[in-house]
Amino acid sequence: KIKGPAPLRRHCQDLQHQVQQISTDVNRLAYRLHPAMLENVGLLAAMKSLCHEITGSGKLLVEFHHQGFFAEIPQDVTLCIFRIAQEALRNCMKHSGAEVAEAVLINNGKEIQLSVSDEGRGFAMNREHGLGLTSIRERLRIVGGRMTVRSKPSRGARIEVSIPLSSDS
C-alpha cells in the first residue's frame, strides 16, 4: 500500500514475503517439536504418516510393519518412540545411501520395541557418533529404555530400542 518510491515499495514487499516465510517455518518447527497427530490419532497412525511422508519425498522408501495394540501407550513413551523413529529415519536418508529402510514397531504387552534398519553404507561402531545417537540415548534414559546399534561399513545399520511399559519391567 506504500505509494512512495518504487524501491521502498519493493523493499517492503520483500520484507512481507520474508515474514510470511518465517511464519511458515515457525509453524513447521512447532509441529516437529510436538506433533498434534500423536495426541489426535495415536502412535500407530503417526508412524504410518511419518513413513508415508518420507517415502513421498522420493529420498527413501520406508517399509513399515507393526504388531500389537498401541491405543493406551503412555504419552511420554509415545513421544519418545516417535522422535526416535524420526531421528533414525532421518539418519537413513542423510547418511546411509540406501534406497529402502524398514521400520518395525511392536507392542508385546511388556514393552514397546522399535527397529529401524537399512542396507546402506553403515558405519564403524568404534568411532565417535553424532548428536543423533546421543539424543536417542538420552530420550531412552528418561523413559527407562535401552538401545542396541548394529552396523558395519558397507553392510547397513540397525537401531533397536525397547521401552518397558511398567516401572517393574
Image: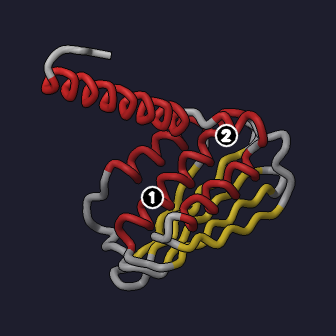
CA neighbours of label 2 inside 10 A, class few (<14), some (14 to 19), many (20+): many
User: Residue type at mark 1?
Assistant: Arg
User: Eyeballing the image, is 55 above or below 31?
Assistant: below
**SS at circle 2:** helix
Q: Nearer the viewer, residue 25 or 68?
A: 25
User: Eyeballing the image, is 11 above or below 113?
Assistant: above
User: Residue type at mark 2?
Assistant: Val
Residue on which disc 2 sits? 77
Q: Residue at x 24, y 15 (%)?
A: 3
Would residue 113 appear left or right of 22 to someone viewing this image?
A: right
Q: Residue at x 52, y 39 (%)?
A: 32
Specify how the rendered protein is coloured.
secondary structure
User: Residue 55 location, x and y as percent?
Assistant: 57, 67
Q: CA distance from mark 2 to mark 1?
A: 20 Å
Mark 2 or mark 1: whose residue is earlier in sequence: 2
User: Residue 132 location, x and y as percent?
Assistant: 39, 51
Please identify the quadrant where the C terminus is shown.
top right
Would residue 10 appear left or right of 64 to someone viewing this image?
A: left
Please identify the quadrant where the N terminus is shown.
top left
User: Residue 79 location, x and y as percent?
Assistant: 63, 39
Q: Nearer the viewer, residue 87 or 5?
A: 5
**SS at circle 1:** helix
Residue on which disc 1 sits? 90
Q: Are marks 2 and 1 in contact (CB under 8 Å)?
A: no
Would residue 108 appear left or right of 20 to someone viewing this image?
A: right
Which quadrant holds residue 72? top right
Q: Nearer the viewer, residue 121 or 159?
A: 121
Eye-nearest disc, 2 or 1: 1
Which quadrant holds residue 31? top right
